[in-house]
Image (cartoon, coloured by chain):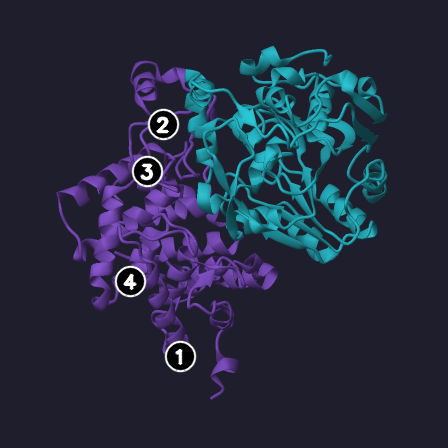
């Protein structure tokens, strides 16, 4: 069999996008970064294709080689601080028994880090005169941030929750549970009117800000074990409403992951995902390519608890 | 739509940003021209031959185009089919064609949307993907570009350094292509504020929260003072946005494209077009100290007169005080 010829297009494209150092960049030819590499490793984890398996091992080696002494992962090559892609790297190494300590190190970093505190003045304003604030949210809640010097937002919080929950086999404890509870509280606080999430603002100057399907799907995957909560129920409804309009590879892939981990059929969305790739090539995004490959296979095995 | 909102309400951002020190900049590196030129050219709507209008606008200025790499930086924030949030694809297409005709080696369109990480959705839904495909032009997602840390050349914030995309650092000409809009945090968003989009989300997040904590106005100045290549501006004022911009405002037809190689002068003129006093916009006031000219008497007007196109753009109550007749 001519494996290269018979290889599915997404796999072929992902293998072609691998950098010489074993990692993947945001686009082919760009410097390797943790997010794209972690997702590619997850995408190729269950392959029976020897070349893909070899690429996956090289990707894992890249992740191991770039884990920082504090346990976290940097954005990518040339970056010297642990930051938001850490939970994705944890998910990528979590399934390998020989990398258990690596995963535990990443999880410990997550437990010890999060968004910055907004300061006493904003805390006081929120408690005493919340209506004076132009945005409606509880600034005292701490989830996870994109950048060590920034506030907590929805997407990095959802990634961290997923990693901590999936990582309970290697790291447990009251501190882990407490961080999970607070991260969930932040997501509950940031639910848009009518359900769903955007980047993390529900209302500005009295005007509701609408949810985004991709962020809603990611948050619901992070909250897949909290289906009894009003936030999960309302946001699942919102996701169903938004699903018809989802058109991009990134959003469709996460929507499929959401459906899969909730035991729902995603055949129609998988067809639309293939059509999206044919239409735009995902604008060359390696991250989306990897996510689409996961979504085309068994996302419940990758993102399910 | 960020924590900067808290700071705005609490009036702490400017205090935090300015407390205990004076803004500074490399005085040897900046020499404001005695006079700047800004061209306002009429364009009734997006169906007129915009490439001709853009070519006419560019030709008023001496720009390093021939043989160079031109990076067009439109404003692409969110997509609302009923709204006018983004720089219209027809204006972007006209700019691609115009710079190609003027001999650019390469013209790319690059943006790093500040709220949505799903760039593919924004680019496709806004019509930009099809436009660029038809033109054979590349779109570069600055949020996910390779980055390099650069030292900022002014100190209005405490940031000191910023990671900037290689696409921007490798440009021979950076063209800021904002929409003519009011803005609920900054007052107005024009060619200087539009440069927030070059700061990569991969490093700073969605929204680019670090900049908000550092102070929106101050960050605008520090980013623009540190750009490595010459800049030019083409403001899409064919249909602008008033009220609760930059996303939830209302369309306001204005019928003009605004051009200039002094972004401060362009923004000051565009603000006057909206009947907003530019010196009451904090970042314009800062920038006018060393980056360019905001005073009307220092701006030579080309094309349509300001008076013939000036309109009263609505602003949110917080910014009522920025209204003015537009004098110096």
Q: CA distance from mark 1 to mark 3?
A: 39 Å
Residue topped by disc 1: A49
The chain ID associated with circle 1 is A
- The mark that comes first in sequence, 4 or 2, is 4
Side of A169 relative to A34 (left or right): left
Do the CB atoms of the residues marked 2 and 3 lie less than 8 Å apart? no
**Residue at point 34%, 53% (across, down):** A73
Figure label count: 4
Q: CA distance from mark 1 to mark 2?
A: 48 Å
**Chain coloured cyan:** B
Do the CB atoms of the residues marked 1 and 3 lie less than 8 Å apart? no
Residue topped by disc 4: A93
The chain ID associated with circle 4 is A
The percent position of residue B254, horizontal first and vertical second, equals 75, 26
Q: Are marks 4 and 1 on the same chain?
A: yes
Quadrant of the rendered image containing residue B94? top right
Could you tell me which secondary element the residue under label 4 belongs to?
helix
The chain ID associated with circle 2 is A
* Image disc number at residue A137: 2
- The mark that comes first in sequence, 2 or 3, is 2
Farthest bottom residue? A1
Q: Nearer the viewer, mark 1 or mark 3?
A: 1
- The mark that comes first in sequence, 3 or 4, is 4
Residue A218 visible to an observer of this rendering:
yes
**Chain coloured purple:** A
Q: CA distance from mark 4 to mark 2?
A: 34 Å
């Amino acid at each position: 069999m001519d494996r290269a010829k018979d290889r599915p297009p997404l796999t072929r494209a992902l293998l072609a996008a691998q950098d010489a150092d074993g990692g993947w960049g945001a686009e082919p030819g760009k410097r390797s970064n943790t997010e794209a590499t972690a997702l590619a490793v997850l995408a190729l984890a269950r392959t029976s294709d020897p070349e893909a398996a070899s690429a996956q091992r090289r990707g894992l080696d890249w992740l191991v080689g770039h884990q920082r002494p504090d346990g976290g992962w940097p954005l990518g090559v040339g970056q010297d601080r642990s930051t938001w892609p850490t939970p994705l790297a944890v998910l990528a190494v979590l399934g390998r028994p020989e990398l258990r300590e690596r995963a535990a190190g990443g999880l410990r970093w997550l437990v010890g880090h999060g968004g910055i505190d907004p300061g006493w003045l904003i805390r006081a304003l929120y408690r005493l005169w919340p209506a004076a604030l132009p945005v409606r949210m509880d600034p005292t809640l701490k989830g996870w941030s994109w950048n060590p010097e920034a506030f907590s937002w929805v997407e990095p919080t959802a990634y961290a929750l997923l990693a901590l929950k999936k990582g309970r086999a290697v790291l447990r404890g009251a501190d882990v549970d407490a961080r999970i509870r607070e991260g969930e509280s932040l997501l509950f606080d940031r639910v848009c009117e009518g359900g769903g999430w955007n980047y993390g603002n529900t209302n500005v100057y009295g005007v509701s800000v609408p949810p985004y399907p991709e962020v809603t799907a990611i948050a619901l995957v992070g909250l897949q074990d909290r289906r009894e909560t009003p936030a999960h129920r309302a946001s699942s409804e919102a996701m169903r409403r938004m699903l018809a309009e989802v058109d991009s590879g990134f959003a469709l892939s996460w929507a499929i992951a959401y459906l899969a981990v909730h035991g729902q059929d995603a055949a129609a969305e998988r067809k639309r995902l293939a059509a999206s790739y044919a239409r735009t090539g995902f604008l060359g995004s390696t991250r989306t390519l990897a996510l689409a490959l996961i979504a085309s296979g068994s996302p419940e095995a990758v993102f399910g608890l | 739509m960020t924590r900067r909102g808290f700071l705005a309400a609490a009036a702490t951002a400017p205090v935090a940003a300015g407390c205990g020190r004076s803004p500074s900049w490399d005085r040897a590196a900046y020499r404001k021209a005695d006079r700047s030129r800004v061209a306002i050219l009429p364009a009734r709507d997006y169906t007129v031959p915009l490439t001709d209008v853009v070519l006419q606008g560019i030709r008023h200025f001496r720009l390093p185009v021939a043989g160079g790499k031109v990076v067009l930086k439109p404003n692409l924030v969110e997509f609302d089919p009923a709204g006018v949030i983004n720089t219209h694809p027809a204006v972007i297409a006209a700019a691609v064609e115009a710079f190609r005709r003027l001999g650019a080696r390469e013209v790319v369109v690059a943006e790093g949307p500040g709220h949505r990480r799903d760039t593919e959705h924004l680019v496709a839904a806004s019509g930009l993907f099809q436009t660029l495909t038809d033109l054979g032009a590349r779109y570069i997602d600055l949020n996910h570009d390779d980055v390099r840390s650069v030292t900022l050349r002014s100190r209005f914030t405490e940031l000191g350094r910023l990671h900037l995309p290689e696409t921007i650092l490798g440009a021979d000409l950076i063209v800021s292509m904002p929409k003519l809009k009011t803005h609920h945090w900054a007052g107005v968003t024009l060619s200087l504020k539009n440069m927030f989009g070059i700061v990569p989300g991969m490093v700073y997040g969605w929204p680019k929260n670090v900049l908000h904590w550092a102070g929106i106005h101050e960050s605008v100045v520090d980013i623009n003072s540190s750009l490595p290549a010459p800049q030019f501006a083409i403001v899409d004022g064919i249909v602008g946005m008033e009220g609760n911009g930059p996303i939830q405002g209302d369309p306001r037809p204005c019928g003009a494209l605004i051009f200039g190689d002094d972004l401060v002068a362009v923004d000051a003129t565009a603000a006057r077009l909206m009947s907003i006093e530019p010196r009451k916009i904090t970042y314009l006031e800062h920038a006018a100290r060393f980056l360019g000219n905001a005073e009307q008497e220092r701006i030579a007007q080309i094309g349509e007169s300001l008076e013939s196109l000036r309109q009263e753009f609505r602003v949110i109550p917080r910014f009522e005080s920025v209204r003015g007749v537009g004098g110096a």
